[in-house]
Amino acid sequence: MEAVNIFELEAIAREKLTKQAYDYYASGAMDEVTLRDNRAAFDRIRLAYRVLVDVSHRDASTSVLGQPIAWPLLAAPTAFHGLATAEAERATVRAVGATGTVFILSTLSNTPVEEVVATASGPVWFQLYVYRDREATAGLVQRAEAAGCQALVLTVDAPLLGRRERDVRNRFRLPPHLSVANLLPEGYGVVAKDSEDSGLASYFYSLLDPALSWKDVDWLRSITKLPVVVKGIVRPEDALHAAEAGAAGIVVSNHGGRQLDTAPATIEVLPEVTEALAARGHAVEVYLDGGIRRGTDILKALALGARAVLSGRAILWGLAAEGEAGAAHALKLLYDELDLAMALTGTPTVADITRDLIWRPAGSP
C-alpha cells in the first residue's frame, strides 16, 4: 500500500470505485456543510501536550460495554460494502477483528448477519433501523441476537433519509447483484432506481418508520437481552432521555453529515453531552463518530469525554482501495497515529487522556 494516511487512501479509492459508489460513500446532505465541519472542527482543536513523561511503554486498550478491546476505535455501521469489494462485509469484519476491536454491522449490509458473525474473529454489534413492519424488525433483532451479536445500535436520526444531492443526480441504486441481504426474507431487500430521486431515499420513505419515538427504545429493550446503544444524538437533553430510557450507550453522531445539513460538528457538542450525563450521575457510555481521519482525532475525542470513537469512511476507503488488506491498512494507519499521539502528548494509557490536554487560550471559558 502506497498511502501513508487516510486522505491518500481516499484518493486511491476514488480512482477504483464507480462514480456512483464513490459519491454514495463520500457525500453528505445538501450543501455538505456538516460533512466538511465534522472534519474541520477537529483541526480547530489544539493539544497542550505534556513533557518528561515516561512513554516508553504505551497501552491503548480499553473496554466498551464490558468488552475488552485493543484500542478505542470501533468500526462504524456503514451500508453496502459490496460496492467496494466482492467480499463485502466479510472482508471488513476480518480486518476489524484482526485489530482487536468491534465491528458494527449495518442493517443495510450486503451480507446477512449470520454470515458476518460466522466470519468474525472479534465482537460484532448490530445497527438497527426500525421498519414500519414491526414484525420484520423484531425478527431481525432476534436473528442478530441468535447469530451472536453482542449489542444493538439503534439509529434514531433518520426518520427520513437526508437529501444527498450527489445520490439524487446519480439516481443511486444498488447493482443487480447486491441487495439489503438482511431483509431479503421479508421481501425488503431491493433498493431500486427511482425516477425522481435516489433509490435509497425511496426505500427509506416507503419502508422505515418515521413514527419512531422514545417509547420504542422501551419496546426494543423488551424484545432483546442485548444492551441497546442509541446512535444519532447531538443534544444533551436527548442524551439524558436515552440514559433514562435504559440505553447502555449513546453515539454522539450526525450520521456523518448525511442527514440534516448545518447540524453541529459532533466533536463540538461532545463536551455538552458528557457534562450533562455526568451532572445527572448517568454511567451510560458515550461514543463519537464523524470526521475521524487521524489518530489525534481519536485522542481529542477521548480527552473531551468519549469512551471510544466510531470510524466509517476511513475503513471504506481502505476497503475500496485494496479489499480486506486495504481496510486493515486503514486501521493500522489510525492505530499507529494514535500510538504516536499518545507518546507525544505524554499519555501512556487511555486513562491518561484527560480534558486538560485540550488547549484553551488564556481568558477563554
Image: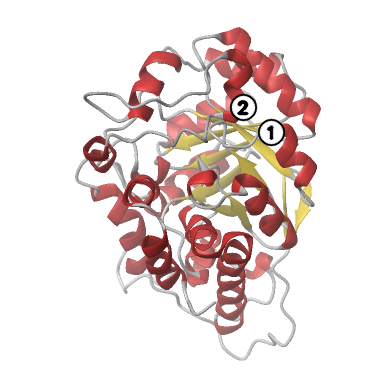
Q: In which quarter of the image is the N terminus?
A: bottom right
Upstream in sequence: badge 2 or badge 1: 1
The reply to whether residue 230 is visible in this rendering is yes
Specify the quadrant of the image occupied by residue 124. top right
* Left or right of 338 in this view: 33: left
Q: Residue 294: percent from the left, percent from the top?
A: 47, 69
The 10 Å Cα crowd at callout 2, few under 14, some 14 to 19, many 20 or more, is many
Q: What element carries label 1?
A: helix
Q: Which residue does the numbered mark 1 point to in the structure image?
A: 113
Q: Is mark 2 on a helix, strand or loop?
A: helix
How far is the residue under mark 2 from the one under mark 1?
7 Å
Left or right of residue 113: residue 28: left
Q: Label 2, on which residue?
A: 182
- The reply to whether the C-beta atoms of the residues labelled 2 and 1 are less than 8 Å apart is yes
348 to the left or right of 319:
right
Q: Which residue is drawn at 46% across and 54% down?
A: 313
Q: Which amino acid does label 1 sit on?
A: Val
Crowding around mark 1 (Cα neighbors within 10 Å: few <14, some 14 to 19, many 20+) is many
